Image (cartoon, grey):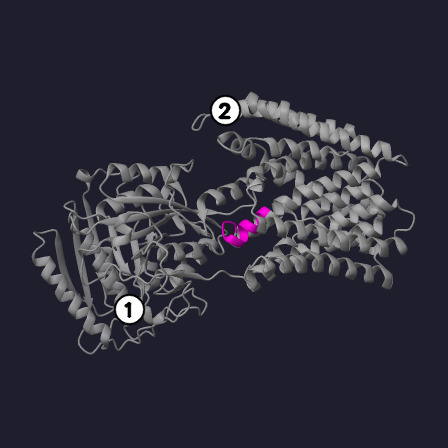
């Protein structure tokens, strides 16, 4: 939209030569035709998102909010229209103009609201559900009012024609429900889950969209209504609606809609807003639009006993305008109800109200995450027989074989100490309509939840299959969020599931030539934020194909696992995990303890720097090289415990103590272990960095070297950060002992 305004007569398009070169009059017809075809299919997608069953189930609270949220601003819009008629819109038809202005100020853009709610993780919360229900009712009412406005504006002087248009429109809706809906239902029924949808069904549906658009245009309402009605009556259950959405959404949202926005921007001439009268009207329109929606919604929400913060959030959410508003304004301009000046004022109002929604809602309302405190937040614990819970995250198919093989080799053989894995598929939230549908399916009360039924996510199904074939309790989850805040899902889910370890994928994958290719800075940032806010220990997995590219059977597990032990809480966590892996009969654990000569430290004279991406959100204790404190005592005690376990291990654990005088000695010893299958190391041991520069600071001084291609192209790495309660000063979940909500329904969850 902004691009269209800049290219149009408001800015660059002031040059007639530019307009004649890039947007000649002949080309505008083609541009607008393509844009309008895209718009038809977009309204079809909007209808698909609107589930009439949810509107029928709308409680009195959402219905009251929707009712006041449309009537109050509609009345204010009619009042504002008199100010327009007295100044810049003299001579327009009074009734159509009043209705158009009322609709323009009272409409809530349902698709835009859905995306804002999904982005803020509010879609499945109480606030989100009320907002979506109210917006859906609001949307349907607004389209009915718009149909009224269009019929009035196209009728000339005779009110009988307007009545005839409305009656024909009502007849079309009845025909669609009686004749077209059963046909769509039959095609949906013949498209069972797990089988491809026949192309002829997709072609028939898309043809129906165009045909019904033609019918409503012929009636005299607008082509958009036909497409919207087909979307609403389309059966929402089963794969048919999902496949339809996937087939057309990329073309519509990626190509046609930007064309429509650009075409709208080209019609908008901000330069027409000149003089105190025009600017005064712009301020008036923005004020009445915001005042009507926000105040009306907040007052009725408070009357319905909605908390103040939630009522404020609902008010600003219902004030969302966006694309639907632009469609209304364009129809008004095409029907000559709005002139250039009033059109430009209303477009700027729509842009302004949409821009302010997200930041204000974020400032006003951020739902507090509360959870019951739990005991086992680290792998290292006094009683190793207790259940170990791991939240294993992955974002592509290439992570799955290594994760499954790691889980298989970590399950041990003890009967008491079970392993419970929550396999979380990390998916980036996109602008696609299908993403919003997936968010509905994969979230509950604003959080990702356990998928009890198999769904279409093939990656999740892979873990479900593994869980059924093994003795490990595997529970698949799906988190769909923007990468900038997906760490909130990871951390809150870890607390909700009472995990002891979050396992994150390293944001680089190894290519065939051995080099590491980055997946982008967003994943690095995500890992850093998880390290900062995690309610438990964290492990970052550098995947180099543990066990090959396929799942290894339990009887075939044969891994050489190395633990590099320098000292410190993170190294103790790595060793604790290694000791658990050593319980598997197919795992040989090789522990190397590094120590410095008497009077020296492993810092080797270097100044140790805390490596963190926390942006000061979490305190980081950095070893100063003296290393004689509490950590040293805990290291010695834990090493003695390890020696006792090693003595009883029957050869599955071997260890060596190595004296090193420089970091070159450390590198030499580590290189000797680079043919092993897996290396476990702490994130922040008190040792000088082994590489001068690293683009992966989240791996720490040793992990950064081990993850480099120079070290190995064979050994996978896990870098551990042990949970430290003394540094957890900005938790995402506030622990409350009176919080009784249980995150899962299984019995062993309640017992832990």
Quadrant hosting residue 187: top right
Answer left or right for 128 relative to 423: right
- Cα separation, mark 1 vs mark 2, equals 64 Å
**Could one spot residue 605 in this view of the protein?**
yes
* Location of residue 312 with respect to 633 vertically, above or below: above
Kind of element beneath mark 2: helix
- Which sits in the foreground, 441 or 341? 441
Classed neighbour count for the residue bearing mark 2: other residues with Cα under 10 Å, few (<14), some (14–19), many (≥20): some
Answer left or right for 394 relative to 326: left
Q: Percent position (x, y) of residue 175?
A: 67, 25
* Location of residue 345 with respect to 663 vertically, above or below: above
Q: Percent position (x, y) of residue 445?
A: 46, 51
Q: Percent position (x, y) of residue 646?
A: 11, 58
Residue, disc 1: 687
Answer left or right for 241 relative to 319: left
Quadrant hosting residue 384: bottom left
Q: Quadrant of the C terminus?
A: bottom left
Kind of element beneath mark 1: loop
- Residue at image position (12%, 66%) is 640
Per the rendering, the mark at residue 189 is: 2
The region drawn magenta spans: 123-133
* Location of residue 645 with respect to 458 vertically, above or below: below
- Which sits in the foreground, 728 or 452? 452
């Amino acid at each position: 939209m902004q691009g269209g305004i800049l290219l149009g007569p408001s800015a660059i398009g002031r040059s007639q030569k530019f307009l004649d070169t890039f947007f000649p009059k002949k080309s505008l017809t083609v541009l607008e035709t393509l844009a309008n075809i895209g718009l038809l299919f977009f309204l079809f997608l909007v209808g698909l998102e609107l589930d009439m069953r949810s509107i029928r189930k709308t409680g009195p609270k959402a219905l009251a909010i929707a009712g006041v949220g449309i009537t109050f601003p509609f009345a204010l819009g009619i009042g504002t229209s008199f100010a327009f008629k007295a100044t810049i819109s003299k001579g327009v038809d009074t009734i159509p103009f009043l209705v158009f202005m009322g609709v323009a100020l009272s409409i809530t853009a349902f698709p835009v609201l859905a995306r804002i709610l999904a982005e803020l993780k509010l879609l499945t919360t109480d606030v989100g559900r009320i907002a979506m229900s109210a917006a859906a009712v609001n949307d349907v009412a607004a389209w009915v009012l718009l149909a009224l406005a269009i019929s009035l504006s196209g009728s000339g002087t005779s009110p009988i024609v307007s009545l005839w248009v409305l009656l024909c429109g009502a007849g079309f809706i009845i025909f669609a429900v009686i004749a077209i809906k059963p046909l769509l239902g039959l095609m949906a029924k013949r498209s069972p889950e797990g089988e491809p949808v026949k192309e002829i069904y997709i072609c028939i549906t898309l043809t129906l969209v165009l045909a019904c658009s033609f019918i409503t245009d012929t009636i005299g309402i607008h082509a958009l209504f036909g497409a919207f009605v087909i979307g609403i009556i389309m059966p929402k259950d089963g794969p048919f609606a999902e496949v339809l959405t996937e087939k057309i959404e990329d073309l519509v949202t990626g190509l046609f809609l930007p064309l429509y926005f650009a075409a709208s921007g080209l019609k908008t001439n901000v330069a027409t807003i000149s003089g105190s009268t025009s600017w005064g009207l712009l301020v008036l329109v923005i004020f009445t639009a915001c005042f009507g929606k926000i105040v009306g919604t907040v007052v009725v929400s408070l009357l319905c006993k909605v908390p103040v913060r939630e009522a404020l959030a609902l008010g600003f959410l219902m004030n969302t305008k966006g694309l639907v508003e632009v469609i209304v304004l364009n129809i008004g301009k095409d029907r000559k109800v709005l002139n250039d000046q009033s059109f430009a004022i209303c477009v700027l109002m729509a842009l302004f109200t949409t821009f302010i929604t997200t930041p204000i809602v974020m400032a006003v309302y951020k739902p507090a995450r509360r959870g019951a405190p739990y005991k086992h937040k680290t792998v290292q614990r006094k009683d190793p027989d207790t259940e170990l819970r791991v939240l294993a995250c992955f974002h592509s198919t290439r992570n799955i074989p290594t994760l499954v093989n790691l889980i298989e080799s970590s399950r041990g053989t003890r009967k008491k100490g079970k392993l419970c894995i929550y396999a979380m598929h990390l998916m980036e939230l996109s602008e696609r309509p299908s993403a919003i549908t997936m968010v509905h399916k994969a979230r509950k009360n604003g959080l990702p939840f356990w998928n009890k039924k198999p769904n279409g996510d093939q990656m999740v199904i892979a873990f479900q299959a593994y869980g059924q074939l093994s003795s490990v309790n595997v529970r698949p989850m799906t988190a769909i969020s923007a990468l900038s805040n997906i760490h909130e899902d990871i951390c809150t889910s870890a607390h909700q599931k009472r995990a002891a370890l979050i396992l994150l994928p390293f944001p680089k994958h190894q290519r065939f030539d051995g080099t590491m290719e980055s997946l982008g800075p967003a994943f690095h940032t995500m890992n850093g934020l998880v390290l900062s806010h995690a309610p438990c220990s964290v492990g970052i997995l550098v995947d180099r194909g543990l066990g090959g590219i396929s799942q290894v059977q339990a009887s075939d597990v044969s891994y050489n696992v190395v633990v590099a032990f320098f000292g410190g809480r993170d190294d103790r966590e790595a060793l604790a995990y290694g000791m658990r892996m050593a319980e598997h009969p197919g795992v040989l654990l090789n522990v190397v303890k590094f120590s410095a000569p008497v009077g020296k430290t492993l810092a080797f004279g270097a100044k140790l720097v805390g490596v963190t991406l926390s942006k000061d959100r979490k305190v980081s204790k950095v070893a100063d090289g003296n290393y004689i404190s509490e950590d040293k005592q805990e290291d010695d005690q834990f090493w003695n415990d390890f020696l006792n376990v090693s003595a009883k291990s029957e050869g599955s654990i071997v260890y060596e103590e190595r004296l090193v005088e420089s970091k070159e000695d450390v590198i030499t010893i580590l290189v000797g272990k680079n043919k092993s299958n897996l290396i476990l190391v702490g994130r922040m041991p008190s040792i000088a960095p082994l590489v001068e520069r690293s683009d992966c600071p989240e791996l720490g001084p040793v992990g950064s070297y081990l993850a480099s291609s120079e070290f190995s192209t064979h050994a996978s790495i896990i870098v551990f950060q042990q949970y430290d309660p003394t540094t957890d000063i900005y938790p995402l979940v506030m622990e409350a002992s009176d919080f009784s909500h249980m995150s899962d329904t299984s019995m062993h969850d309640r017992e832990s």
